[in-house]
Image (cartoon, helix red, strand yellow):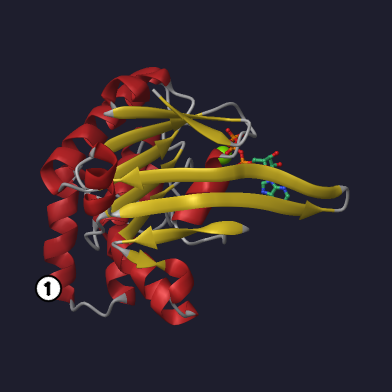
């Protein structure tokens, strides 16, 4: 019953996903028939040792890579059934991505960095300003809007990256070790911020991490080991 319920309300689903990389030394299996389902308003941590396949799985869930077998559905739509354009549009609209490095343009201000995805969507300057204000407020950086990125601390830069990942109002956020470069105090603060963002926006959040601070904030912790997902 609970499985059916999970399937009914899932916003991101992986069904029997396997990934085998081709290498000069032969096939390298990393994921074996993995099943995962994320619901709106859920904060899930994905942990596993280095090389266990966390990034591989996030890339497949985010549509950046294809599974060797199995399928991924975003908002109920199987990615495999879509052409390249529709798939890219679905990914752009529904998914936000966050990485270990903030990847900001150093000479642009926090606000300008955040507005980049909105420029790509051709929103006018008034709409861009409203949206960027809203997410800067959400991440607690209203005061730093006009600071150039290189003038911001590591934690502040990651907040800007989070604001940029949220500004197009995605329903899913995939984060790959977003606190990997931060000290433990800052990392804890960012995690509390994630918790708050999930509550306020009802987004589904999946974070790959080695950081124990994340596990405490998450609703569920999933471990990836030998290509399988272990649910605790
Ligand atoms: N394109 C590729 N071709 C061949 N092997 C790959 C490719 N991408 C990843 N791998 C291998 O797959 C394994 C899983 O890599 P992945 O990056 O998913 O690990 P991870 O759990 O994210 O590790 P970390 O915690 O260090 O980030 C690694 O052994 C890696 O070398
Ligand atoms: Mg990784």
Q: Is residue 154 left or right of residue 34?
A: left
Q: Give the residue at x 29% y 62%.
A: 75
Q: Give the residue at x 45% y 52%.
A: 15
**Residue receiving disc 1:** 126
Please state which of residues 7 and 173 is positioned toward the viewer in this rendering.
7
- For label 1, the crowd category at 10 Å Cα-Cα, with few meaning under 14, some 14 to 19 and many 20 or more, is few
In this orientation, does residue 146 appear? no
In this orientation, does residue 31 appear? yes
Instruction: Answer yes or no: disc 1 within 8 Å of ligand 2.
Output: no
Quarter containing the N terminus: top left
Q: Is residue 165 left or right of residue 182?
A: left
Residue 70 picture location, percent across and down = 53, 57
Residue 45 picture location, percent across and down = 38, 32
Tell me if residue 134 comes above or below residue 214 in the rendering: below
Residue 229 picture location, percent across and down = 50, 34
Q: Give the residue at x 56% y 35%.
A: 228
Tell me if residue 171 comes above or below residue 47 in the rendering: below
Please state which of residues 17 and 157 is positioned toward the viewer in this rendering.
17
Q: Quadrant of residue 114?
A: bottom left
């Amino acid at each position: 019953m609970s499985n059916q319920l999970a399937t009914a309300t899932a916003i991101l689903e992986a069904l029997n996903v396997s990934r085998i990389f081709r290498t000069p030394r032969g096939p390298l299996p990393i994921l074996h028939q993995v099943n995962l389902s994320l619901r709106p308003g859920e904060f899930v941590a994905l942990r596993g040792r280095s090389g266990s396949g966390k990034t591989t799985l996030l890339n497949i869930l985010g549509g950046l890579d294809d599974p060797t077998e199995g399928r991924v559905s975003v908002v109920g739509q199987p990615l495999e059934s879509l052409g390249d354009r529709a798939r890219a549009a679905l990914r752009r609209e529904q998914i936000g991505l966050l990485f270990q490095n903030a990847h900001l343009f150093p000479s642009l201000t926090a606000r300008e960095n955040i507005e980049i995805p909105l420029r790509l969507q051709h929103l006018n300057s008034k709409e861009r300003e409203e949206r960027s204000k809203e997410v800067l407020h959400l991440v607690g950086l209203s005061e730093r809007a006009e600071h150039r990125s290189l003038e911001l601390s590591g934690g502040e830069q990651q907040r800007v990256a989070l604001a940029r990942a949220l500004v197009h109002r995605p329903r899913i956020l995939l984060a790959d070790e977003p606190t990997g470069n931060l000290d433990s105090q800052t990392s804890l603060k960012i995690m509390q911020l994630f918790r708050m963002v999930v509550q306020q926006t009802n987004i589904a959040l999946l974070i790959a991490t080695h950081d124990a601070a994340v596990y405490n904030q998450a609703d569920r912790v999933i471990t990836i080991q030998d290509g399988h997902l272990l649910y605790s």
